[in-house]
Image: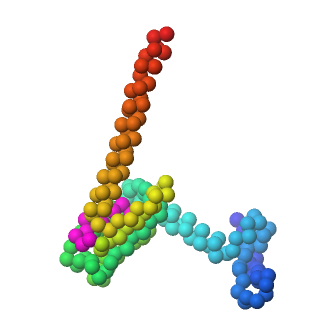
Amino acid sequence: MRLWKPSDVKFIAPKNGRCREGVLKMPEENNGGSGKDIYHILTEAAERRRKEKKSRLLEQLEVKEYFEVGGIKIDKATCDGVECKLCIDACPTYALYWRSGEVGIDEDLCIYCAACVLSCIVDDCIRVWRKRPNGEVEEFSTPKQVLTLLSNINSKKRKERVEFWLEYLKQIPKIRKMSSI
């Protein structure tokens, strides 16, 4: 692997010449001709490292990550963290912790499971959003919303199982006929 020297990075000025800002780009011959600017290359590398770190940490905790994209926010004004700390106790990955008088969040450990929202005694205190692999975005901030979401997901799974078995039962007479031949 070749290490980059400062002379390898070139400053490419815009074509119109009016703007003083330019884009730092890797030399075309060394980066496969992609022409990506250095910011995007460094951002992608940092994101890869963050994901690798998160997967190692979750592997040690024996927790599976279902949602790669998501976010969590705690409204410090409505949080009764000093008095309850229920969200901290409910978090399976220890992403929530006590920090100098308030609840802190370690985004690298959060798997957006909604256990904190479900255990919180204050509505709209903890807001979690997550993106499913199929692209569907879910957002919730009350235990009722979490329970409704989980109920809907379980209903869809039950419906799929029933449809599968109904289709399977329709196929049994055809299978019997084929086996009797």
Q: In the depicted view, which residue is nearer to us: 40 or 167? A: 167
Furthest residue toward top: 181
User: Is residue 122 covered in magenta?
Assistant: yes
The spot of residue 79 in percent (x, y) is: 27, 77
**Number of numbered discs:** 0
The spot of residue 179 in percent (x, y) is: 46, 14
Q: Write down the quadrant of residue 98 in the picture.
A: bottom left
User: Is residue 17 covered in magenta?
Assistant: no
Which range of residues does the magenta coloring cover? 110-123
Residue located at (77% from left, 66% from top): 33
Examine the rendered structure and indicate whether residue 63 appears above or below residue 77: above
The spot of residue 96 in percent (x, y) is: 33, 70
Residue located at (37% from left, 67% from top): 128
Residue located at (64% from left, 71% from top): 41
Q: Is residue 168 left or right of residue 102?
A: right
Q: In the depicted view, which residue is nearer to us: 134 or 94? A: 134
